[in-house]
Image: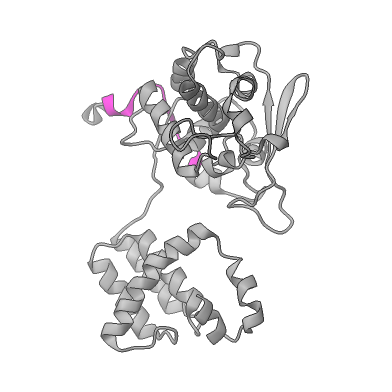
């Protein structure tokens, strides 16, 4: 990537700034694509940086014949376009190629339906009182309640810092100060509002959060700023996004949700779809979940019918 920027005319003094615009996750995704492109150019004896239309189309076609999905091919295009001396990624012929890929190998949203949050909340309600359950159960309970109550990505939840938690008489407010996936110039950072849910205290995320902070001996022996800490070896370190996803999946599985269909990110689908079904306005859903006012992401990818039963029990032939 560094060499690609230099070949595009970026002065070396500005390369580090350019590289900082790319997230670590994106760099990781692009790494695999660029390795495959490197092998292709080495075998075909063509230039790695001076990408021709012919070589890019041939490479993408080879990958497609090897079984690559539309999303993988699109990732290849983005990675190669980033390091290319020619802005070939937006070429009309390449766009036409991808329309053909979609026709031959369609790519659709992951879920056509989602699960009812009440199924999980009813299970979580059994993990009460908060002060009496194990640290493991308390941690997993807090994570799933935060995910459902806020509709935020797991990445955002992993970045909650104790210093950014503010308690009021009727709610807890959490500000996110770290850069997240949707951070950008002029865009507001997420603010998570957790009202005290006195009607059903067993599933109140604000009360669960208070208990987690108060009862954690680990908080006194750790200098970690993050709210969510590991409870297994190595003890009391900031929980990674991957670890939190695993905790969410554990709760979903314990609740009876089919985790062969739904992953941890499905909490975002479930919570926002249920909110929409309950009559919450689209503007409020967008604001809470971190989508812009003009975003059509919810309508296109997240608003799904909510099933009140386990989808694995549905007889497709009876539908």
Relative placement, left or right, of 185 versus 111 is right
Q: How many marks?
A: 0
The residue positioned 29% from the left and 73% from the top of the image is: 61
Q: Relative to the observer, which residue lies in front, 196 or 161?
A: 161
Relative placement, left or right, of 274 versus 263 is right
Percent position (x, y) of residue 158?
56, 40
Quarter of image, res 285: top right
Q: Is residue 85 magenta?
A: no
Percent position (x, y) of residue 110?
39, 45
Relative placement, left or right, of 92 versus 97 is right
Q: Is residue 90 visible?
A: no
Q: Quadrant of the C terminus?
A: top left
Q: Is residue 307 magenta?
A: yes
* Residue found at the far front of this picture: 221
Q: Relative to the observer, which residue lies in front, 95 or 206?
A: 206
**Taking 74 as reference, is 125 above or below it?**
above
**Taking 12 as reference, is 229 above or below it?**
above
Percent position (x, y) of residue 91?
47, 78
Here the colouring is one colour
Q: Is residue 310 visible?
A: yes
The residue positioned 32% from the left and 59% from the top of the image is: 69
- The range drawn in magenta is 302-313
């Amino acid at each position: 990537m560094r060499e690609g920027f230099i070949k595009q005319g970026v002065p070396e003094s500005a390369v580090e700034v350019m590289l900082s615009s790319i997230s670590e996750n994106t760099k990781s995704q692009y790494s695999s694509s660029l390795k495959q492109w490197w092998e292709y150019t080495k075998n075909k004896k063509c230039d790695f940086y001076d990408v021709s239309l012919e070589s890019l189309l041939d490479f993408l076609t080879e990958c497609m014949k090897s079984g690559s999905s539309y999303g993988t091919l699109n990732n290849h295009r983005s990675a190669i376009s980033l390091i290319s001396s020619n802005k070939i990624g937006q070429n009309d012929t390449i766009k036409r190629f991808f329309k053909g890929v979609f026709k031959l190998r369609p790519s659709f949203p992951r879920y056509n339906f989602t699960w009812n949050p009440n199924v999980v909340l009813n299970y979580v309600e059994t993990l009460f009182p908060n002060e009496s359950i194990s640290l493991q159960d308390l941690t997993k309970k807090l994570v799933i309640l935060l995910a459902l109550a806020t509709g935020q990505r797991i990445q955002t939840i992993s970045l909650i810092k104790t210093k950014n938690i503010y308690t009021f008489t009727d709610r807890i407010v959490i500000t996110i100060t770290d850069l997240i996936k949707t951070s950008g110039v002029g865009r507001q950072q997420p603010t998570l509002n957790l009202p005290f849910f006195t009607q059903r205290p067993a599933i109140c995320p604000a009360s669960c959060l208070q208990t987690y902070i108060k009862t954690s001996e680990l908080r006194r022996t750790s200098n970690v700023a993050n709210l969510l800490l590991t409870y297994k070896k190595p003890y009391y370190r900031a929980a990674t996004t991957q670890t939190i996803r695993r905790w969410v999946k554990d709760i979903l599985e314990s609740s009876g949700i089919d985790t062969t269909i739904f992953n941890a990110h499905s909490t975002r689908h479930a919570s926002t779809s249920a909110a929409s079904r309950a009559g919450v306005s689209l503007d409020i859903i967008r604001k809470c979940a971190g989508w812009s006012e003009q975003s059509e992401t919810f309508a296109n990818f997240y608003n799904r019918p909510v099933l009140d039963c386990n989808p694995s029990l549905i007889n497709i032939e009876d539908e």
